[in-house]
């Protein structure tokens, strides 16, 4: 039987930003059913698929970034700055996403933000817009394990189940989606247990 192999996806394929286009799956605070958070017409909108409860929020903030040519590895990089407090500084020290070398760079505003609260909420197993629990949420050794939607869940199961993992077809040496996985999911000793827990989530 051929070995199960998978090609990784480009970095950002499964992100909050991409999930908001089709629907970020969360748990409705009223009925406990599945709801979707989307970005539509300049607003974040939540709608429960079971009871119909809805909420919305306006966009806030601005898109900001730090661009630089890394003095260590020589690569050009573009790092988004989501923290509104940090956006007020004209210059920030940020690490190169390729090699980790930290150097100062000018903060540039690039337009109105598709704003969300960053990775802190995700690490707690909550969506970063409304703070609702993610629908595809479980835990391993007391730490939350989650997927943003069914597509993300299928990717995680496929990647963790594979014996051979390849870079994306058009990979040019940058980060891949797997680079965004928490350390808990990267450890080989956890993969079998993780896959079983994620497969149970597919039944929801």
Image (spheres, helix red, strand yellow):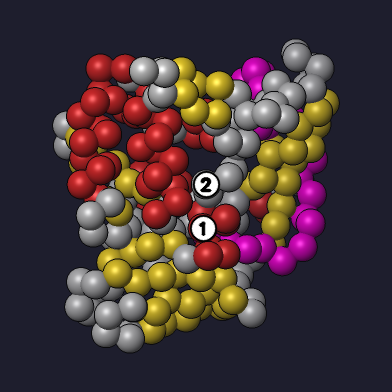
- The local crowd at label 2, few if under 14, some if 14 to 19, many if 20 or more residues have their Cα within 10 Å, is many
Residue toward you, 130 or 83: 130
The percent position of residue 60, horizontal first and vertical second, equals 60, 70
Residue 105 visible in the current orientation: no
Residue 158 visible in the current orientation: yes
Residue 50, placed above or below residue 75: below
Question: Could you say which quadrant of the image residue 154 lies in?
Answer: top left
Proximity of marks 1 and 2: CB atoms separated by less than 8 Å: yes
The percent position of residue 9, horizontal first and vertical second, equals 58, 36
Residue 171, placed above or below residue 130: above
Residue toward you, 180 or 111: 180
The percent position of residue 34, horizontal first and vertical second, equals 30, 69
Pointer 2 residue: 14
Residue 178, placed above or below residue 43: above
Residue toward you, 22 or 125: 22
Give the residues drawn in magenta, as a range: 93-116
- Mark 1 element type: helix
Pointer 1 residue: 19
Instruction: State the residue at coordinates (55%, 29%).
Output: 7
The percent position of residue 22, horizontal first and vertical second, equals 53, 65
Is residue 202 left or right of 80 when viewed as pictured? left
Instruction: State the residue at coordinates (33%, 78%).
Output: 49
Instruction: State the residue at coordinates (25%, 50%).
Output: 201
CA distance for labels 1 and 2: 7 Å
Q: Earlier in the sequence, mark 1 or mark 2?
A: 2
């Amino acid at each position: 039987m051929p070995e199960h192999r998978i090609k990784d996806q480009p970095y950002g394929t499964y992100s909050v930003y991409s999930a908001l286009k089709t629907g970020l799956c969360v748990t409705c605070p009223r009925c406990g059913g599945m709801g979707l958070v989307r970005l539509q017409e300049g607003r974040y909108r939540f709608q429960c698929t079971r009871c119909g409860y809805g909420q919305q929020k306006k966009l806030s903030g601005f898109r900001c970034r730090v661009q630089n040519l890394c003095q260590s590895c020589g690569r050009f990089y573009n790092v988004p700055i989501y923290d509104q407090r940090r956006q007020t500084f004209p210059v920030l020290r940020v690490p190169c996403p390729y090699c980790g070398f930290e150097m100062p760079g000018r903060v540039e505003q690039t337009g109105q933000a598709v704003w969300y609260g960053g990775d802190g909420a995700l690490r707690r197993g909550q969506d970063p817009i409304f703070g609702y629990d993610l629908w595809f949420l479980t835990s391993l050794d007391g730490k939350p394990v989650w997927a943003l939607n069914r597509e993300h869940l299928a990717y995680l199961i496929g990647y963790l189940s594979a014996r051979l993992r390849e870079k994306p077809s058009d990979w040019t040496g940058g980060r891949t989606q797997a680079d965004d996985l928490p350390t808990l999911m990267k450890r080989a000793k956890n993969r079998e247990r993780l896959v079983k827990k994620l497969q149970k989530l597919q039944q929801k």
